Amino acid sequence: MLKLNTLAPCDGARKDRKRVGRGPGSGSGKTAARGHKGARARSGYSMRAGFEGGQMPLHRRLPKRGFNNIFKKEYTIISLDALNHFDNGTVVDVQALIDAGLAKANSMVKILANGELSRSLTVKVDRVSQGAKEKIEAAGGTVEV
C-alpha cells in the first residue's frame, strides 16, 4: 500500500553528483576532470554565447542582408469599421483611440478604408487614406490631419 512515508523515487531516477578532486583513487582527482591548463581549466571560466572554440562563429559566417532604416515611421493601422465603436458626433483623436484600446500609447495612427462607417465623426489622426477620407465625409463627418 502506498503511504507518504514509503514514497521513494524509481530506481535510476536519481543519480549522485560527480565529486571531483578527491584523490587519484576516485578517477577524477588531481586536475579534477579539467585537463591540463587552458581556459577551461581555470576558475571563473565561462564560455561566451556563440563561441565555437576559435572557429569563426555562425553569426559572423552568415552574410549580412538588407538595411534597417532608423528613421522609419511605424503607423498603427485602424480600419474604418472599427470607428463604429464611437458615438455620433464624437471627436476621434489618437487619445480617444488609445482609451478605446484600438491603439497603443505614443503611436502614430493611420485610418484605412476597410469596411463601412455608419456614424458622423470628427477624425483627428496622423494619416488618413484617400478612400477613408471620402467615406468619412460621405457619412457626414470631417477629417483633420
Image (spheres, rainbow, N blue to C red):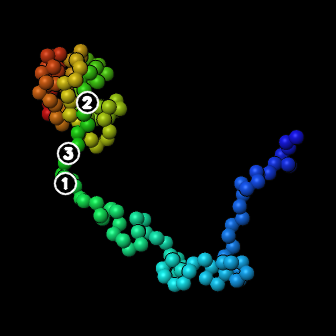
Q: CA distance from mark 3 to mark 1?
A: 15 Å
* Corner quadrant of residue 17: bottom right
In this figure, which residue is indicated by the disc labeled 3?
Answer: 73
| Mark whose residue sits in front, 3 or 1 | 1
Amino acid carrying label 2: it is Ile
Earlier along the polypeptide chain: callout 2 or callout 1? Answer: 1
Q: Are marks 2 and 3 in contact (CB under 8 Å)?
A: no
Asked which quadrant contains residue 144, the reply is top left
Relative to residue 9, is residue 89 drawn left or right? Answer: left
User: Where 102 sits versus 41, above or below?
Assistant: above
Query: Split into 4 quadrants, where in the image is the C terminus?
Result: top left
Query: Where is mark 2, residue-wise?
Result: 78
- Dot 3 or dot 1: first in sequence order is 1
Q: Which residue is mark 1?
A: 67
Spatial separation of the CA atoms under disc 2 and disc 3: 16 Å
Residue 135 screen position, x and y as percent = 15, 19
